[in-house]
Amino acid sequence: MVQKELKARGRPRSFDADAVLDKARAVFWNLGYAATSLDDLAAATGLNRPSLYGAFGDKHALYVAALQRSRDESVRAMGQALALDRPLREVLGIIYSSAIRIYRAGDAGQRGCFLVGTAVTQAVDDPEARDLLARFVDESDALFADRFAKSKDELAPGADARGAAAIAVATLHTLAIRARTGADAPSMQKVADAAVALICGPV
């Protein structure tokens, strides 16, 4: 999409727009939206301000594009994992293990989830960020609820698909927050294991 916009604006393809967006996202991820300056973005991407403006628009448009990319990637990854033809307990284990690995990564330290880590604070007075974040949560709930409805026999006694989905998604959010606090992998895994036991019942 970004590269199509570049072509439409007549700018030469002298750089990889997707790679530039990834680098910009890393800056927003580490610093947050408000603390990120155009100089920070220019230094990270190797582009000057006019080039950044020409390719993506202003700082806010670049941030929203980064949020949308993260939303797309996360929804796609969750959908693929939840569609695995494996026992539900195993599927949840795969999802949480992957989340812990991703949330604990980062060139400047553990940085959690890009959407949860940056859009939550930005959403207070940023309608675009708030809407994108709300849709991401709704989509996440729906994906888990759909899998849980299909695997209802594997849920803990008395659990319903929608309620279990809310717990599953909330667990991802708390793992992201704990990663930002510097939590280690074993302590985060205990949280994930507790959530799986609550959703599927004890082993």
Image (cartoon, rainbow, N blue to C red):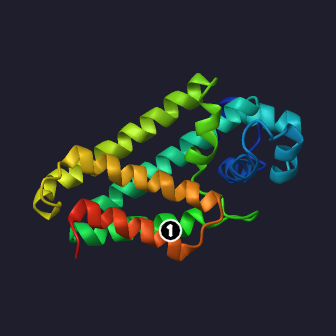
Which one is nearer the viewer's eye here, 126 or 182? 182
Tally of numbered discs: 1
- When asked about the image quadrant of residue 53, the answer is top right
Which one is nearer the viewer's eye here, 32 or 200? 200
The residue that label 1 is drawn on is 188
- When asked about the image quadrant of residue 141, the answer is top left
Specify the amino acid type for callout 1: Met
> Where is 141 relative to 84, above or below?
above
Which one is nearer the viewer's eye here, 117 or 48? 117
Residue 189's spot in the image, x, y percent?
46, 72
**Residue occupying the point 48% across, 46% down:** 72
**Residue occupying the point 51% across, 33% down:** 132
Is 43 placed left or right of 146 in the picture?
Answer: right
Residue 87's spot in the image, x, y percent?
21, 71
**Residue occupying the point 22% across, 54% down:** 147
> Where is 10 relative to 142, above or below?
above
Residue 158's spot in the image, x, y percent?
13, 53
Q: How crowded is mark 1: few (under 14 residues within 10 Å), some or many (20 or more)?
A: many
| Residue 186 in sight in this render | yes
Question: For numbered disc 1, what is the local secondary structure?
Answer: helix
**Residue occupying the point 68% across, 48% down:** 25
- Which quadrant holds the C terminus? bottom left
Residue 19's spot in the image, x, y percent?
69, 54
> Where is 107 relative to 52, above or below?
below
- When asked about the image quadrant of residue 33, the answer is top right
